[in-house]
Amino acid sequence: MRLRLIALLLVAFAAPARADTGSNGSGDDDTPTADDMRDVLGGERAQNVRATDDAPAEKPDAQDEEPATGTIRGGAYADTDHTTVLRTIGILGKTFGRWHLDGSFTVDAVTSASIDVRTSPALSKVDTVTSASGISTTTGGQMHDTRYQGTGGVGWKDSAGHAFNATTALASETDYKSISGGLNGSYDILDRNATLLGGLTVTDSWVSSVLDPSLHRKLFALGWSAGIARVLTRNDALRLRYDGKASEGYQASPYRSVRFGNWTTMTNADHQIIFDNTIGSPDGLPERVPGSRVSHALTLEWVHSLAPGIGLHPSLRVARDTWGVTSTTAAVDLRVARPSWRLDAGYRFYRQWGADFFESKYVMDPSAYRYYTSDKELGQQVGHLVTFDIAAVLIDKQQESDSRLLLDARVDLFRYSYPGFLLLPSRSSAFVELGLIWEL
């Protein structure tokens, strides 16, 4: 039964994770991203799992060295809120017996004329510095930045179902820098028919502004998770996971402003959004949000084997935080694994209820409010995500010393609506990524 669980989990949970294409702003952490698809459940490599239950799995010899792997990915993101991201990723990994080392480097080139940029008093101006990278423009309402991120990790596992991983990451933008570290592990019990899971992450961030050299703020975040996966039948397994996160420090955006009163808007010839009928300055005031935020999420996943190498993976997630943001995510994925190709197709639905202090318009004087924001990610949301990912072997090994080359292609289509956010009722986006994977 344990062998069937291993094969089942590989089909259902083995889709590679990629980083979110969004920024490191103060948006809702419960919004589903591709990272939500990642599972900490391990297991033997796919090529070491046979297709039938009566054939024993080939256990890798702890003294044998598996081939090094190298991955290059290129992707492009675009949305109807006038934001584009060009992404390049390089990944290296190597297994030494029971140990595994890996590292990655990611470069994101971002160009945006989003609603946040065009409503910012400073970023929307013409002939001024209007970007996080400090580039001046004569068009107004556009920003450019480049984000760099490097990661490293070390992992260990034995043949008895015990695994441990340690990771670290460094990220840098012109006005944002962070360092993080994480530990996670798994431990099999009940004759390897159940797995206990746990993890901890720590992130320290530094926030600044190219428009205000005096602004230097800190943000600290601690995340934790715990879960259990259990084999129910030869074809079914369940996993229940709890995730928590506590953030302390500066969680606003240095570029986002809030207008007060029953305001109206118009767009001028330079694509600036002009506010009228405001209480006080039409430039508004910098947003103000609490300095502390704690979130809790519970996820239930079911893995069902439809046939050897074919798995169905429904899941349900509910979350709430101390700002009052509540969300529900329902998803279903179909995963197919064959000797020379793998397919992953999925859909997920997201529903969010906004923060306690979020309002479509703050119609009274600013002194009447303790907190105020113009961040659409803190309001109501309804989201739909369709994912299609296929990987295929381009060059297979003819003998043990040969290299293996695989091609991976992924398409994510998003559609979000923002009830109650008057400046942007909806947003559609697409992310397309191609990757080459070498086994050297």
Image (tube, rainbow, N blue to C red):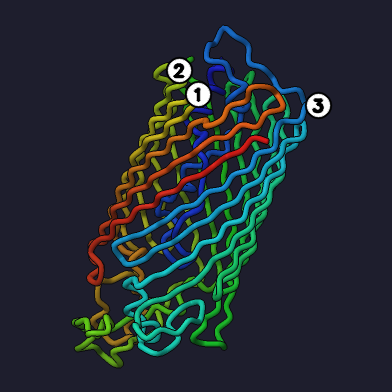
Labels 2 and 3: the sequence-earlier one:
3
Residue 414 left/right relative to 92: left
Task: Compare residues 402 and 376 and report the one nearer the observer.
Answer: 402
C-alpha span from label 1 to label 2: 8 Å
Q: Which quadrant of the view contains residue 26?
A: bottom left
Q: Which residue is mark 2?
A: 235
Q: Nearer the viewer, mark 1 or mark 3?
A: 3
Q: Amino acid at mark 1?
A: Leu
Neighbour tally class for label 1: few under 14, some 14-19, many 20 plus, Cα within 10 Å: many
Dot 3: element: loop
- Disc 1 or 3, which lies upstream in sequence? 1
Residue ID at (23%, 81%): 363
Compute the Cα span from label 2 to label 3: 33 Å
* Residue denoted by label 1: 8
Question: Pointer 3: what residue?
Answer: 63
- Residue drawn at (52%, 27%) of the image: 9
Residue 237 pos. (x, y %): 48, 24
The numbered mark, 1 or 2, whose residue comes first in the sequence reads 1
Discs 1, 2 touching: Cβ within 8 Å:
yes
218 up-or-down from 195: above or below: below
Quarter that holds the N terminus: top right
Q: Regarding mark 1 in the picture, which secondary structure is present there?
A: helix
What kind of residue is marked 3? Gln
CB within 8 Å, label 1 to label 3: no
Q: Residues within 10 Å of mark 2 (few under 14, many from 20)?
A: some
